[in-house]
Amino acid sequence: MTRANREDDNDRRIMAVLAANARQPTVAIAKKLGLPRTTVHERIEKLERNGTITGYRAVFASPAIAQRLEAMLLLSIRQRRQSEVVRRLESLPEVRSCASVSGEFDLMLVVEAPLSEDLDAVIDEITSLEAVERCMTLIVLAKKFTRGD
């Protein structure tokens, strides 16, 4: 990590406030943290420029959006085929994240769909990939807490 990308305590405090509510005006963040408004503004711009802050997102409370089914899939992939599988997974909008993991499995996915039938179809599509040898599916029953991205 270069010196320009290192965050100090004030940067971390600003990021924590933004994670809780990214829509707050700079002046409100500055007041909350006891920092000058210009300092907060400049630091947010720096964090955006250096890629520490990559964007902001909306969190929806609407049942149609909020009540999506979520599953975690653990995949075993044939040797030397992981990049091919990852490229295919990237094209599926229901796959929210994909991580390489250690242990018995090779990849861990977070998959979301509005209905159980949709989730089942996505899982079928993933498990039908030739390079996928094994899949363990874990359905999320309830989220106890979620931290900001």
Image (cartoon, helix red, strand yellow):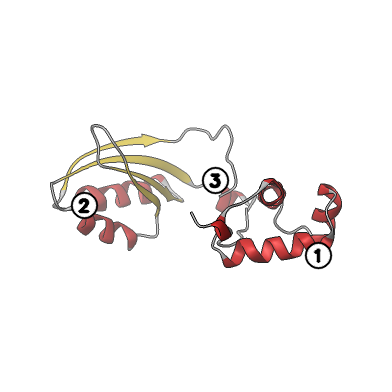
Is residue 118 visible to the viewer in this orientation of the structure?
A: yes
| Other-residue count near label 1 (Cα within 10 Å), few / some / many at <14 / 14–19 / ≥20 | few
* Residue 8 versus residue 51 in the image, above or below: above
Mark 3 lies on residue: 67
Residue beneath label 2, please? 82
Where residue 31 appears, as percent x and y from the top left, is 86, 52
Instruction: Say whether residue 138 is left or right of residue 61.
Output: left
Query: Compared with residue 17, is residue 84 higher up or lower down, i.e. above or below?
Result: below
Measuring 76% from the left and 59% from the top, which residue is drawn there?
40
**Residue 50 appears left or right of 104:** right
**Label 3 vs label 1, nearer the camera:** 1
Q: Secondary structure at mark 1?
A: helix
Front residue (pair 34, 75): 34
The type of residue carrying mark 3 is Gln
User: Against 8, is 55 above or below?
Assistant: below
Amino acid type at image mark 1: Thr
Is residue 25 among what the camera can see? no
Q: Position of residue 92 (x, y in %)?
A: 34, 60
Spatial CA span between label 2 and label 3: 31 Å
Rendered location of residue 53, percent (x, y): 59, 59
Residue at 73 percent of width and 59 percent of height:
23
Q: Earlier in the sequence, mark 2 or mark 1?
A: 1
* Left or right: 137, with 12 as reference point: left
Q: Which mark is residue 89?
A: none
Q: Residues within 10 Å of mark 3 (few under 14, many from 20)?
A: some
Which of 75/41 is in front? 41
Which residue position holds label 1? Answer: 38
